[in-house]
Image: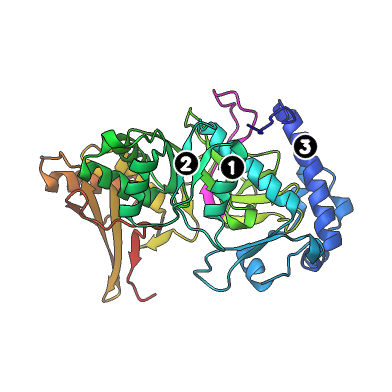
Amino acid sequence: MVINFNNVPGTREEMLALQEKGLVWTVKHAYENCDFYRKKLDDAGVSPGDIKSLDDISKLPFTEKQDLREAYPFGLMSVPERDIIRIHASSGTTGKKTVAYYTRQDLDDWMEMMARCWHFAGITPEDRVQITVGYGLWTAGVGFQLGIERLGAMAIPVGPGGNELQMEMLIDLGATAICCTSSYALLLAEEVNKQGVQDKIKLRVGVIGSERWGKKMRARIEELLNIETFDIIGMTETYGPGTGIDCHVHEGIHYWSDYLIFEIIDPVTGIEVPPGEEGEMVVTTMRKEGMPLIRYRTRDITRQIIEECPCGSPFFRIDRILGRTDDMFKFRGVLVYPGQIDQMISEMEGLNCEYQVILKRDQGRDSMLLRVECTQDFCGDRSELAEEFLRMTKAKVGVSPQVEIVDCQCLPRTERKAKRVFDERDI
């Protein structure tokens, strides 16, 4: 195992001092080597010499997703092209793809962060890890594999193959860990249960990310596969997967605060919110050479956790991702995050983890249909369960949808990210 935590700051004060040093370096590096950031800072009236401490970070302008699209393909490159040895890109579902460029040091840093994630999940060189996510321009597959190989475990790069192939590899190759989206983890777990092959697989760990997933989905995946799951975060703009993961305590996400600075801001005002309050996560890289990021607005909603984790890790924490500012929808004047629905489902007996929200408009009036699966063993009155969930939704979210309780495993499953909100209104 080549992971070395010896140089990681041991106290919060030492970590903050390292972040201050990294912020100063990043701003100077970006200003001197990237036309995009030089112009952005000049337009904001900020020079590298103005950034002397972490408190000065608020002087810096935000970097938006649209900035990255407009800089396509090489506008954010901050080293000579000969130093770039890898290119990745986002899926590009809206507008141009987001292209990321990596120096050899960037790849080594990313590999280290991913290896840390596997280490936090309890993976050792004795494990066999089945990778079910995509390869290619997307960072996911190769990112997971980088960390597995750095750690010294065995990588099984199946990629996004169908259920039959995944099941065959799980059984024949004896994978002890798997990485996938939460939607696919649920699909696979239900397939294992359906086929009754739990005794033929050796899984003990699932590293799951790429989309928000609630407590009830987590519990169902763990129950059906008899594994412990770990919530991993990351995005193409900040290396890829592996910028943080939860530990065995499962009380928030540890992010690699010796590589990244996280802020939580009010998504409307752009002002940092007090510790513990929910807001939008903003990321600044501390040592990324090929494509540094300064105050990048991720659109992810979470909160900082200041208290020390019982696991004793020195790395800072955020809460699990509640949702995204661009996932939220407005219903009759109320802003609703899908994560709020996840949370309510997790608090009610008789409900399974999957749901759908269908929004329509008829003669100028909005309607919301909320379909929620019941559990396999639920034998009560569905109308009473629907009424109870409606009361909870009115009390906690402030909206009154029509609630329909449907059969377990009735709603669609997917190998990719699940779509749960269907807005059919002509807005």
Residue shown at 89%/52% (left/top)?
49
Vertically, is 308 above or below 66? above
Q: Distance between the residues labelled 3 and 2?
A: 33 Å
* Residue 314 among magenta residues: yes
Q: Which residue lies furthest to the right in this view?
A: 49
Position of the N terminus, as image quadrant, is top right
Q: Which amino acid does label 1 sit on?
A: Glu
Q: Give the foreground label among 1 and 3.
A: 1
Vertically, is 243 above or below 98? above
Vertically, is 25 above or below 71? above
Dot 2: what SS? strand
Q: How far apart are marks 1 and 3 (CA)?
A: 28 Å
Q: Distance between the residues labelled 1 and 2?
A: 10 Å
Dot 1: what SS? helix
Residue shown at 10%/40% (left/top)?
379
Q: Which of marks 1 and 2 is nearer the N terminus?
A: 2
Residue 129's tag is 2
For label 3, the residue is 18
- Which percent across, then down, holds residue 211? 45, 52
Quarter-wise, where is residue 31 in the image?
Answer: bottom right
Residue count near mark 1 (Cα–Cα under 10 Å), binned few <14, some 14–19, many ≥20: some
Residue shown at 86%/54% (left/top)?
48
For label 1, the residue is 149
Foreground residue, 388 or 242? 242
Would residue 276 be visible to someone looking at this image? no
Please provide the residue range marked out in magenta.
299-317
